[in-house]
Each structure stands twice: as structure tokens, then as C-alpha cells.
Image: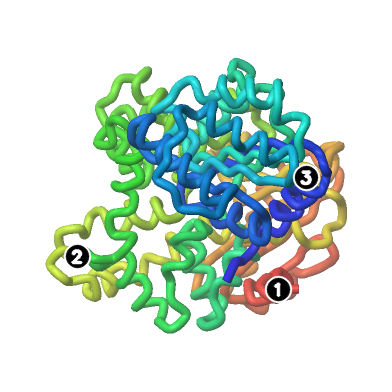
Amino acid sequence: MFIGRESELNSLSEHYASGNFEFFCIYGRRRVGKTELIKEFIKGKKAIFFTAVEDTKDVNLVDFSQSVRKTLYDIKSKAVYADFGEAFDDIYEYAQKEKLVLVIDEYPYLAASYPGISSLIQVEIDHKLKDTDIFIILCGSSMSFMENQVMGHRSPLYGRRTGQIKVLPFDFDTGKRFFQRGTEEEKAVIYGITGGIAKYLQLFSNNKSLKDNIIGTFLNSDGLLFEEPANLLNQELRKPALYNSIITAVATGSSKVNEIESKTRLNSATCVKYLKNLVELGIIKRETPIFDNATSKKSIYRLNDGMFRFWFRFVYRNISRIQLGMGEQVYNDIKDQIPDFMGEIFEQICKEYIWKTDLPFNISEIGRWWGNNPAKKAEQEIDLIAVDITGTKAIFCECKWRSKKMPGVVIDELIDKAEMFSHKEKYYYFFSKSSFTDTAKAKACDNIKLIEFSDMFEHLEE
């Protein structure tokens, strides 16, 4: 069953119905669901669907020839076009008479085997295809390639596209739709450890418990996620061992460049270069405190991918035990640490809730804050701050994924921290997995909201 991607499908459908030439770039990290999105879109449409492979130009030409002939003439033919130009001649002849979709999936592989393909497609568009009703889709998992070599201003294809879609991991509201059983908390945990990636969500069975799902996918040497990070790094990067060391450093608490350098023993230039590549892949994110600019010296690096975060925290250090068939033992050792792992995930869910719910004002930005509190002469953090476009109104948020009820002292502490900021209107939102103490409840008022996870879940279901 296809789940989500309603806005992406609507955009593709609107352009398809335009009656004009259309050219879309669809890109995003591996396993995020790009191919499934395209397959859903082309259902019932005349479409050539070709997936490039990491091989020679000749091998890709053979496969492309078969895809074109099968769609245009409904025949399985071993005949191969003399070159890609001849294949596009056939496509053009057909597109003059009938609406057609042309999909080239894993386009970076084709471009690597045949560097002239982008120039060829540019010539075909400029001289022929722009006057037809064809819909071209180039799709790729290499985000840097798609952004720079296909959509970038130096690309031969620059200025030809009519749209693009960066396919992102699902938010919690959509990700939980994959599961019909389990508690609200279990659905959140599954969402957290899969990072909202479509392929990983599909691996978790509705017929198994959370424990059995985690053991079966992560804590079993035959599990489909047991070696997933290593496989992804090997596919995307030339020196996976060095990247692995950086990810390990970040996963184990090193967040500043100098800390990562110290733990990996890489020089500054190399470390920054590799971090940049990991950011482009969506595995790591560079984060600055809200209100600081992008070049802030307070910037830190965090794992952006929930699956990587879970794997490096709980699987990496237990590989030997898992290979010996001790997955259940490992699960029993880590299960009490999962609530702490969920803290960052819960912040993401709270952020999603804030964007989607009715608030006292329209927000323009939301993010974490950390820095020095001059009044306390101490470093402090605030989980989330949401502000309006004028900068005069703010919502300060505390997010706690804990088994204990949130006490009233947490409310007092956040209000105290907010004294650092000069916003004229201040509101305080407290999110708790496990409700609130009576002392905390007594503090609730118009500008202090207490929100339980179960209530958030119901709101996002609406």
C-alpha cells in the first residue's frame, strides 16, 4: 500500500496535466521512497521507466533500448539502438503523437558511464522535445550530483527543468500510518529508529512486537538493517572507514569540529571536508542556535538520521555478540536506554506538532537554543523556541520523553531561562510523554500549556 507523498503527487499531476513540455528532477537520499513515488505517479500513464546501473555506457544503452522499445512498441526486443541519440529520435517521434513520460532513475550512474548524456538531453530538449507534451523525470540518490551537475548553473540542463522535488523522510504524522498495531509510544520508537525512511518503515511488521521487530531487523546478523550503514557508506563514499570514524565520534558525543578532530585524529581541513559530504548525504546535520547566523562559532554537528543514530549507539558496539546469535540479550541490555535515545526524536515530533497546531501567533522559525546565560554565568539550553516574523513574540518549549511525570520545577526553570530574551509576548509549552505532577498542572494558564504525548498523537491523527 502506498502511503503519504500527497503534495508531491499533486505537484506532479498538475504539471502532467499542463499540456506542455515538463522536466522534473527528483532526488533524495537512498531508501527514502523516490522510486515508489515515481511508480505511483506513472500508474495508468504511457511511461518509459529506465533504471541506470553502475556499469559501462554500452550496458546502460542495452537496458535503455529495451525499456524504450518495450514501452513504445510493446515488444521485448534484443535490438539495441546505435547510440542514445537514436533512442531519443524514436522517443521524439512518439511524443509528437501521444503524451509520454520518460523516467531515468539513478541518473548519476548513467552520467558517470556516459558524461555526455546531459549535453545530449539538453540538445534534444532545445531542438525537439520542448515542443512536445513529454514529461521527463531524472531521478538520483546522489544529492550533490543532482543539485550541482543537473540543476546547477554550470550544468547543460540548467534552466530547462520545470520543477524539482527533494524527497525527504516522512514526518511522524505520516510515518505512524505504516502501523495498525502497537501503542502510541511504540509507534514513536519505530519512527525514531527508522528515521522516517520509507524502506525501513516497511521492514517493521505489524504482526510482531516492538521487541521482535528490533531484534529481527537490527540485532540479528541476517537482519536487513544489521549492516545497512556500512552498505550505504560503501555505495556513496570512497573512504568509508574514515567517514565511519567521524560518524562514530558524533554518535558518541563529539559535536564540535575540534572534538571530532581529536577523536578521529584527522586534520582540520580533512575533517571539515568529510563532515560537509556527510551533511550533503543527510546523515549528519550542522546546527546553529536559533537567532545565530549560519557561520556562528557555536555551530555543532549532530546525527540527522535516526537509523544511523540508533545503529551507532546500540548495534556498532555489540556486533560480535549479535553475530554469535545473542540479539535478545543485547536487546535486554539496551531497552532501558531507548527512552534516552528518544529525547531528540521527541523534540522533532514536538516541532512537527507546533508547526501543525493552532498557536497564539503565526511562527516563522523554530529551533533549539544553547549558549551562555549571563545572569547565571552558566551554559544553558532550551529544547525549542518558536518565534514570529517580527521577533516580538516567542514560544519557549521543554520536551521530556520520560517515564516520570514532569514536575513543576521544570516549568519554573524554563520561565527563568526565558528571562534572557527580550520578546514582548512569551508563551511556554511543555511536552511530556508521561503527563504532569499536580504541582505542574496547577501552573497551567493562558500562556503556559501542558501537552501530553497522547494528546499530540490524537491531534496529529485528525
Going by the numbered disc 1, the residue's amino acid type is Glu
Q: CA distance from mark 1 to mark 3?
A: 30 Å
Residue visible at 64% across and 18% down in the picture: 153
Label disc, if present, on residue 260 of the rendered structure: none
Q: CA distance from mark 3 to mark 2?
A: 49 Å
Label disc, if present, on residue 461 of the rendered structure: 1
Colour pattern of the rendering: rainbow
Which of pointers 1 and 3 lies earlier in the amino acid sequence? 3
User: Callout 2: few (<14), some (14-19), or many (20+) C-alpha neighbours within 10 Å?
Assistant: many
CB contact under 8 Å: marks 3 and 2:
no
Q: Secondary structure at mark 3?
A: helix
Label disc, if present, on residue 322 of the rendered structure: 2
Which residue is denoted by mark 3 in the rendering? 15
Q: Secondary structure at mark 1?
A: helix
Residue visible at 53% across and 44% down in the picture: 68
Residue 402 visible at all? yes
Going by the numbered disc 3, the residue's amino acid type is His
User: Callout 1: few (<14), some (14-19), or many (20+) C-alpha neighbours within 10 Å?
Assistant: few
Looking at the picture, tell me which residue is in the foreground, 348 or 223.
223
List x then y, in percent, for residue 166.
62, 42
List x then y, in percent, for residue 194.
46, 60
